[in-house]
Image (cartoon, coloured by chain):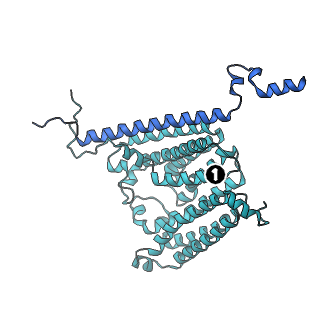
């Protein structure tokens, strides 16, 4: 008896024999890295110190939960992922992982991550993680994504939860700082994704995903990018006056927001012909900068959590000693 | 006739997957073990609550008793 399969040399997709890396791809490692970073910041800036192993475990379980929701997203969206250039090489449309395997991995990792986070940290954090997985997989992926141009506005909440979960892991409750970190990512998501949609519009049209660029056109999307970018400014700067902020954060936030608003203004001023002529250079730059924008804010939170920054903060009356 | 060899691409992929899953499991076990050690170290008088309450092993109860004396 051998384990040689008759279909090895056929043109059929080789599902059921995926490599380990294919399963890792299902967990959206790039998104996971952002989740790890923001959740870690949430834990480290909280006023309660945890054992390093507890921090490590909590971050791993939060990342696993995020990965699980990514796998469920790929399972549900396999039909439209096949149509879009950006997602056609994902494991399911590429034929390396069977849809059932992705569903199984997503469901089992969701359960494992939530239960383990509850045991490692606390059940409020685990509940928030469970809600995040549900929100991303069911509310965003299965419902909003294909039904409304506000999909990424509301769905953005799923990506905004990790720092709040991190904060709850350390403190056991949801503080105002956790809400502000959530709000920062929530308000940042629309300009980030809509700038991507501006130069990836054909992909979304082909897959009939009702992104704002598809339903209302690029001019409206440009105006919305500017609107959300302006609305983001008070959230980003206001956070600087809370316990997790300080003069360093505020300086970084002012600089980053000035560049971000300028980029959004440029996008708003541009005509479609101009953008097509230079291959959407301004939009692509804005999209790339949006990643640096978020990273910069959270890195500044981390700096503010160091003893050196606390000493500096003590010299300014606004933040106290 | 083609020989059945163990180094077919399929076998390499399976080996990679098995090694990956194995390493992930080892990492998970180490993490749970580390977490247990960290929690027990921080847990204080765990022995005082071993199956039933044992006041003799609970520093807080000892303090109270000394105070009453």
Q: Chain of mark 1?
A: A
- The mark tally for this picture is 1
Return the residue found at the far right.
B69
Q: Is residue B50 visible?
A: yes
Residue A66: horizontal and vertical position, in percent?
52, 47
Compared with A290, A82 (above or below) is above
Compared with A134, A157 (above or below) is below
Chain shaded cyan: A
| Residue at 71% from the left image edge and 19% from the top image edge | B52
Pick the quarter of the image with the C terminus of chain A.
bottom right
Residue A212: horizontal and vertical position, in percent?
51, 65
Residue A144 shown left or right of residue A171 in the figure: left
| Along the viewing direction, whichever of A259 and A140 lies nearer the viewer | A259
| Along the viewing direction, whichever of A295 and B40 lies nearer the viewer | B40
Compared with B42, A310 (above or below) is below
Pick the quarter of the image with the N terminus of chain A.
top left
| Residue at 43% from the left image edge and 50% from the top image edge | A77
Label 1 neighbourhood size at 10 Å, few (<14), some (14-19), many (20+)? many
| Along the viewing direction, whichever of A71 and A116 lies nearer the viewer | A116
Chain shaded blue: B
Return the residue found at the far left.
B1
Give the structural element (helix, strand or loop) at label 1: helix
Residue A321 shown left or right of residue B12 in the figure: right
Residue B69: horizontal and vertical position, in percent?
90, 22
Q: Is residue A213 visible?
A: no
Mark 1 — residue?
A: A44
Q: Residue B34: which quarter of the image?
A: top right
| Residue at 32% from the left image edge and 47% from the top image edge | A95
| Residue at 25% from the left image edge and 45% from the top image edge | A12
Residue A293: horizontal and vertical position, in percent?
56, 66
């Amino acid at each position: 008896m051998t384990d040689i399969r008759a279909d090895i040399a056929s043109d059929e997709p080789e599902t059921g024999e995926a490599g380990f890396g294919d399963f890792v791809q299902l967990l959206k490692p790039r998104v996971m890295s952002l989740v790890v970073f923001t959740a870690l910041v949430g834990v480290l800036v909280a006023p309660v110190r945890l054992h390093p192993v507890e921090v490590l475990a909590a971050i791993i379980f939060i990342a696993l939960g995020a990965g699980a929701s990514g796998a469920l997203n790929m399972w549900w969206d396999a039909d439209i992922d096949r149509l879009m250039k950006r997602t056609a090489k994902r494991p399911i449309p590429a034929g390396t992982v069977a849809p059932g395997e992705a569903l199984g991995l997503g469901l089992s990792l969701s359960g494992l991550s939530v239960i383990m986070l509850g045991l490692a940290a606390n059940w409020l954090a685990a509940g928030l993680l469970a809600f995040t997985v549900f929100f991303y997989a069911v509310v965003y992926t299965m419902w909003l994504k294909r039904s409304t141009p506000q999909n990424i506005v509301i769905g953005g909440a799923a990506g905004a939860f990790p720092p709040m979960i991190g904060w709850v892991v350390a403190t056991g409750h949801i503080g105002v700082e956790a809400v502000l970190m959530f709000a920062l990512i929530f308000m940042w998501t629309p300009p980030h994704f809509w700038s991507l949609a501006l130069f990836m519009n054909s992909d979304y049209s082909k897959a009939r995903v009702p992104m704002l660029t598809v339903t209302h056109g690029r001019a409206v999307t440009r105006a919305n990018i500017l609107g959300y970018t302006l609305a983001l400014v008070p959230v980003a700067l206001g956070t600087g006056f809370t316990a997790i902020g300080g003069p360093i954060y505020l300086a970084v936030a002012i600089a980053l927001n000035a560049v971000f608003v300028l980029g959004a203004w440029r996008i708003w001023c541009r005509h479609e012909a101009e953008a097509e002529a230079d291959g959407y250079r301004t939009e692509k730059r804005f999209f790339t900068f949006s990643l640096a924008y978020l990273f910069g804010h959270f890195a500044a939170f981390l700096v503010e959590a160091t003893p050196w920054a606390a000493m500096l903060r003590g010299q300014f009356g606004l933040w106290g000693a | 006739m083609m020989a059945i060899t163990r180094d077919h691409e399929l076998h390499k992929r399976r080996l990679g997957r098995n090694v990956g899953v194995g390493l992930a499991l080892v990492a998970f076990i180490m993490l749970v073990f580390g977490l247990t050690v960290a929690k027990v170290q921080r847990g204080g008088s765990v022995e005082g609550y071993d199956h039933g309450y044992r006041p003799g092993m609970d520093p807080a109860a000892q303090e109270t008793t000394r105070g009453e004396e």
